[in-house]
Image (cartoon, rainbow, N blue to C red):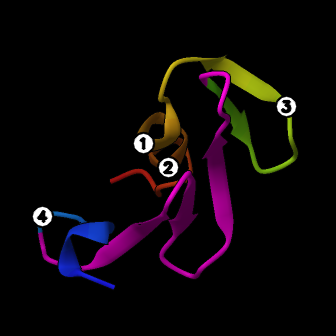
């Protein structure tokens, strides 16, 4: 896997990674999935919205500063 598939915060800590259409958090749990129809689904399968909103879902799971 190349380094471009990792998502890092400003300090360099890995907060997520992409596996094709899946987005996983830093611990490896699935956060969101982009369907072939163009809908983003959260971990439980509910539709979040149309388009690629995977990073939005990852941001919702991050702790507040």
Contact? badges 2 and 1 (CB < 8 Å): yes
Question: 6 or 20: nearer the eye?
Answer: 20
Up/down of 3 relative to 31, above or below: below
Badge 4 element: loop
Q: Which residues are magenta?
A: 11-38
Contact? badges 2 and 3 (CB < 8 Å): no
Q: Name the residue that disc number 3 marks.
A: 46
Chain-order first, disc 2 or disc 3: 3
Contact? badges 3 and 1 (CB < 8 Å): no
Residue pictured at 59% horizontal, 22% vertical: 38
Q: Where is residue 27 shown, x and y percent of the image? A: 57, 82
Q: Nearer the viewer, mark 4 or mark 2?
A: 2
As measured in the structure, the alpha-carbon distance from the residue carrying label 3 to the one carrying label 4 is 30 Å
Question: 24 or 62: nearer the eye?
Answer: 24
As measured in the structure, the alpha-carbon distance from the residue carrying label 3 to the one carrying label 1 is 16 Å
Q: Quadrant of residue 45?
A: top right
Chain-order first, disc 3 or disc 4: 4
Q: Name the residue that disc number 4 marks.
A: 10
Structural crowding at the residue carrying mark 4, measured as other residues with C-alpha within 10 Å and reported as few (<14), some (14–19) or many (≥20): few
Contact? badges 4 and 1 (CB < 8 Å): no
Chain-order first, disc 4 or disc 1: 4
Q: Nearer the viewer, mark 4 or mark 1?
A: 1
Q: Indicate which disc residue 58 carries.
A: 2
* Magenta stretch encompasses residue 32: yes
Q: Where is residue 52 shown, x and y percent of the image? A: 47, 29
| In the displayed structure image, the side of residue 30 where residue 11 appears, left or right | left
Q: Indicate which disc residue 55 carries.
A: 1
């Amino acid at each position: 896997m190349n380094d471009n598939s990792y998502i890092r915060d400003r300090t360099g800590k890995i907060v997520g990674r992409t596996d094709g259409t899946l987005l996983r958090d830093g611990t490896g749990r699935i956060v969101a999935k982009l369907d072939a129809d163009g809908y983003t689904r959260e971990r439980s399968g509910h539709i979040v919205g149309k388009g690629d909103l995977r990073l939005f879902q990852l941001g919702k799971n991050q702790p507040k500063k």
